[in-house]
Image (tube, coloured by chain):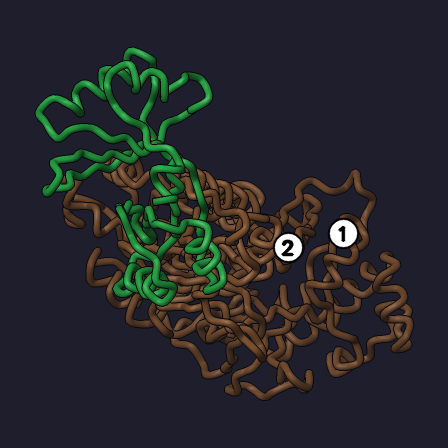
Amino acid sequence: MQVNYWNKAIETIDRQALRDMQLRQLRHTIDQAVKTHFYQRRLGKVGIQSGNDVGSLDDLQKIPFTTKDDLRQNFPRGLLAVDPEQVVRMHSSSGTTGIPTVIYLTQEDLDQWTELVARSVVATGCTKQDVFQNMMSYGLFTGGLGLHYGAEKVGMMVIPIGGGNTQRQVQVMRDFKTTAVHITPSYLLHIHSRLEEFKVTPKDLFLRKAFLGAEPYSENTRCKLQDLYGIDAYNSYGLSEMNGPGVAFECVYKQDMHIWEDMYLVEIIDPATGTPLPDGEKGELVLTILRRDAMPLLRYRTRDLAFLHQDPCPCGRTHRRLSRILGRTDDMLIINGVNVFPSQIEEVIMGVPDVGTNYMIRLDKHESLDRLTIQVEIYSKMFTGDASEIDALKNRIKERLKASITINPQVEIHEPGSLPVFEGKARRVIDNREKL
Amino acid sequence: MAKQLTVFLENRPGRIKSVSDILLENNLNIWAFSIQDRGEFGLMKVIVDKPKQAHLALVEKGFACAIKEVFAICAKDKPGNLEKLTTLLLQNEVNIADAYGFVSPNDRQGMCFLEIKNPQKVDIARVMATAGFEILDDEKLYEL
């Protein structure tokens, strides 16, 4: 199989040389981190005043974990480690209680991120001859812009179309002979289900590769997509706190994702105790970003469950591989690639006086896409007997949810007392989608 | 005016029965009813002999139930009466929100329960009376 590299020296670096590089970068990162009050205090408590206090990579274990809560508590600029005028970009994800998490990048930080994405797309075999249609949404979400710059750097022609409008996506794929797409697996399945309607078959397209990401899916789904379109589909992993896409990517061998270890210190821990686990064991992924001056994050708990392995890859890359994401340690839901916490939905429902406080969240597949249904109970005292008022109520809940979680849900109104009542821990989410 | 109960029901088997069960338990008599299908739910509209008692019984059992005043219009059963009624409403620019009607076969009497938008805008009772329709008052409806 043809193996291409973007940066062969780094991608195939000797493990010992990689560790030396990681230690240098960790020291640099700590020097950056202590410029923030947050890390100055936190690292001071464990006797680390500067990067010089870190003797070896083993000292990483002394450093306390950083969590999403820490990011929220330091909103908006508490973790910024450079002069604000050095910042050239911010990205943000929606928060669980209305406080978003923000990341900042200097031009150099952006270049580092772009380098990882360039490596990643070249690892899948893409070259500057490829035409790349980026179907992830642009904007505050990192999925769109992240891949965009990396693909441009490689010299691919980038079509920055963003998500949605299926008919136009297919038209553009035909007109510009798109060879590679970045897309959620559910949307790629959905497009296939509508091709016939546009009188197009996969053979009329020029598609060769798909970068899949932003939501969990099974190996079966990947195989199905490859068969339906006659393409190669590659798994990818990223999260906005760690820049976004490009943290880990599959190479042409498609046997799990190489995680770029010159950029990230990677640990798998037992989520209950925080103890590091050896390669091969499933646990929570913890990442330390080594090249981001604007906003260093040390031992960040991703809440994603996965395992690592170090078996040599036929592609020659020495960076360890990360399994597909096997679950979450919290209750976050991923709906058509958008991260949603049930607490965000609850907050909206509690703000609507016409419905009771009991509710359920249901997830189904509808034409390959995720469909979110919120079930609420009508509140007897507010019921006027007017059907149009119930329609208006449904629309009001829909609009508020759309504003809060950016997803358009179905809303079902039920009789008072008809939804399950929980005495212990409430299990309000019913997920009927494919299990991994 | 007639007091119509509107009951919110989920659209699944047995829900209408659950309402009629409660009415029976309380020995309440149904004079008319209609069902409005709205997808995952429906509205059951019922006219009973003792509306306040029925409302209380349903609310006690946890139903979302509202009482609304509607016109109970009475006319001889003969061709053209609905046409006459709707012409009258149109002439007075009255929009019908909801209506259901039936004929009592034995005494050849037509009945229509009518809910209109903005009932205060027009003196419906007077308009109906001039055209020969009778609007049943509370005495006639509930104190038989």
Disc 1 packing (10 Å; few <14; some 14–19; many ≥20): some
Q: Where is residue A293 in the image (x, y as percent from the top left)?
A: 75, 54
Q: Which chain carries label 2?
A: A
Label 2 element class: loop
Image quadrant in which the C terminus of chain A is located: bottom left
Give me the residue at 54% from left, 65% from top: A332
* Of A212 and B15, the residue lying toward us: B15
**Which residue is situated farthest in the top direction here?**
B91
Q: Position of residue A305 (x, y in %)?
A: 53, 76
Label 1 element class: loop
Give me the residue at 47% from left, 60% from top: A416
Pointer 1 and pointer 2 on the same chain: yes
* Of A16 and B62, the residue lying toward us: B62
Q: Name the residue under label 2.
A: A95
Q: Classify residue A63 as left or right of residue A334.
A: right
Give me the residue at 20% from left, 28% from top: B75
Q: Mark 1 points at which residue?
A: A75
Shade of chain B as shown in the rendered figure? green
Q: Position of residue B131 (x, y in %)?
A: 25, 16
Disc 2 packing (10 Å; few <14; some 14–19; many ≥20): many
Discs 1, 2 touching: Cβ within 8 Å: yes
Q: Classify residue B136 as left or right of residue A17.
A: left
